[in-house]
Amino acid sequence: MKFSCNRDNFTEGINIAMKAILGKTTMPTLECFLIEAKDDHIKLTSNDMQLGIETTIPAEVTEPGMVLMNAKTLSDYVRHLPQEKVEVEVDDNNTILIFSGSTRFEHMGLGDDDFPRLPEISFDQEITISQFTLKEMIRQTIFSISSKENNKLLTGELFEINKDELRIASLDLIRVSIRKIKLDKEYDHIKVVIPGKTLNELSKILSTDKDDMIKISFSKNHVKFEFKDTLIISRLIEGNFFNIDQMLKNNYETKVKVNKSLFFGCIERASLLIHETDKNPVVFNIKDGEMKMEIKSTHSSMNEDVTVEKEGNDLRIGINPKYIIDVLRVIDDEDINLYFFNANSPCFIKNKEESYIYLILPINI
Amino acid sequence: MKFSCNRDNFTEGINIAMKAILGKTTMPTLECFLIEAKDDHIKLTSNDMQLGIETTIPAEVTEPGMVLMNAKTLSDYVRHLPQEKVEVEVDDNNTILIFSGSTRFEHMGLGDDDFPRLPEISFDQEITISQFTLKEMIRQTIFSISSKENNKLLTGELFEINKDELRIASLDLIRVSIRKIKLDKEYDHIKVVIPGKTLNELSKILSTDKDDMIKISFSKNHVKFEFKDTLIISRLIEGNFFNIDQMLKNNYETKVKVNKSLFFGCIERASLLIHETDKNPVVFNIKDGEMKMEIKSTHSSMNEDVTVEKEGNDLRIGINPKYIIDVLRVIDDEDINLYFFNANSPCFIKNKEESYIYLILPINI
């Protein structure tokens, strides 16, 4: 096997394929890229058995072939090469030689026999959306997936297609985050749960350019993402996701409109008093025109007023400020709306179009 | 006690005084600032028993007084205050109230009885140099202090004044780093060892403006640094530092002049092959006009040539590339000079004026 390519293209491809390389494994092949040289490109494949990535890099291939190379080692070498032109040669013993300028790296590769190839799956349905939109939807919901492995479903995000609407949702047992967008046309119903890790890694390599598109295909057990020179296949999480619609309400007893950045500053100050040992809530005292926030810890207390527009009943309710901070961090609107029922019912943060809906359970006070 | 001051000045003072606050202690007073309001300023004092800091902040003092407040809590609160004007009130029970805009923090402070005041010491001799110069000298030598507490002296840096020369040096058992500058006049001989931690913390708050000066005063057991509104007192490390002059040599058998950035790139690539399990050296093969570098690990090898100007004998010598990287990182010269004797003697990296001298022991090959 023999090829030459551009160092920066090579590095870019390596960075993408690295997302499916686990840190330490007991199987050396899972720490490797499968490097295939063929036609006018090389293809890097990585597979951690949950998530598989294939990405191609333009190359001048003199002698086609395949080899396995430790991914971290390849990444370190290529990133540090002195010149843009990189030449790679692999002999029959899988000895890999990398040349650039007067640098010569030599590394013992492995044969490709044991490498787990990406599965051949027939996908039933596909949608195409903007990479930027998907990246945003993930950012705006992923923070409320559960990190606890004992309920596997909650470590993923619901992807649901209803006619011409895509809804992404995540929940732990205290809050729910939902984002919706309109699709270009109507599709058959899809309801799958994609692992949080897949979405996190995918999100890191998605473009921030609104015009760059991504194709998402679904099968019973897998989801596939295709964009530019890259293809990502992930297993889905099996099981029935919670019925989210049951948790949502359209009416309210109290509605509060508040300037986001004023509210954010205040909630951030309140969260300074949350120590690991005493998880006290912020108590919101909502009256006409003003929301008073108050929090107490063992040695400290803090209170502050924020001007608001209120509709409906006065209310006194306790909420963990960290959950509100998580939501305010991902909303870009200037003003936000909070909807309440009573001191024991969830608080909703949502916009008029309900393109985002956040639900947070209160704390008893 | 009652005063008002500017939030950003307050934050700046807090950041300085934080440098002598330990993370977790068994003495709550050591996690506190002593806050004193007097005349037209407040004074923050911190003391971790090795290092003590006093810094003043302009303030409008309505009622003088003193209180102890947890440093981290004060830092968190003040940094997050919504408005520039901060008002602080402390009542007779040491309850501290902090007001800014419509925010009101309340915190239980402590009386100042147990706080360890900074010692009153008479200092024998003082010098004044540029803060930037001191910061640079520390940066260029501190990396070779030892982190091992079993030889306390090596965890500090030698500060030695000989007539009109200040010399700073550090060493672990494999290398020595030395920086020298000329002083404005001749002084009495001084030879002290300042803890690495003191210099690290000091370095973080020194100005990068060459015109900002710092006064350094020495006594038998302490060193004092004074600049702008801040005073830092540190204990010295007791004992006789190694005789550095004995290790230095003025002649050489082989001299190599090499472009720093080319050399740096090559050594960085070589260091990729150093794994924790096999600490192999880079083997330097020095000949007329060229230096060939080679390194082998269990699964990999790398070699590269660099063009050099050589004087004296050919040489083959093994050196840990990490030690060379540490030196190259802090030298700003375009070309650097390496001086060798033989494969078993230290390598020297120094400039003509010997304002810096680095000594690195070779590895047997």
Image (cartoon, coloured by chain):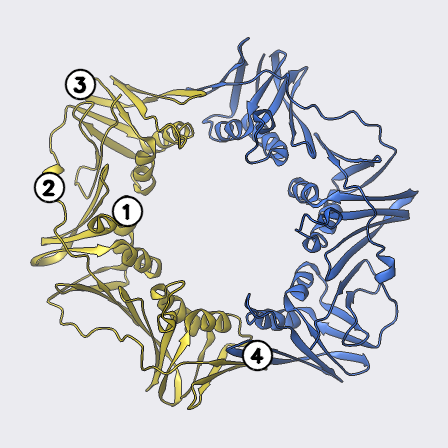
Chain colours: A blue, B yellow
Q: Position of residue A192 (x, y in %)?
A: 82, 43
Q: Residue at x 44, y 90 (%)?
A: B91
Q: Is residue B296 above or below residue B166?
A: above
Q: Position of residue B7 (x, y in %)?
A: 47, 75
Q: Position of residue A122 (x, y in %)?
A: 84, 28
Q: Earlier in the sequence, mark 2 or mark 3?
A: 2
Residue matched to label 1: B148
Residue type beneath disc 1: Lys
Work out which quarter of the rendered image holds the C terminus of chain A and state it. bottom right
Eye-nearest disc, 1 or 3: 1
Report the disc number at residue A302.
4
**Chain hosting mark 2:** B
How many angstroms separate mark 2 from mark 3 (CA)? 25 Å
Q: Residue at x 13, y 65 (%)?
A: B219
Residue matched to label 2: B245
Viewer-proximal residue among B82 and A95: A95
Is residue A284 toward the left or the right of residue B237 in the image?
right
How many angstroms separate mark 2 from mark 4 (CA)? 60 Å
Residue matched to label 3: B313
Where residue A222 sits, quadrant-wise, is: top right
Work out which quarter of the rendered image holds the N terminus of chain A and state it. top right
Report the residue that reaches farthest toward the top: A92
**Chain hosting mark 3:** B
Say few, some or many: other residues with alpha carbon within 10 Å of mark 3 (under 14 / 14 to 19 / 20 or more). Answer: some
Q: Earlier in the sequence, mark 1 or mark 2?
A: 1
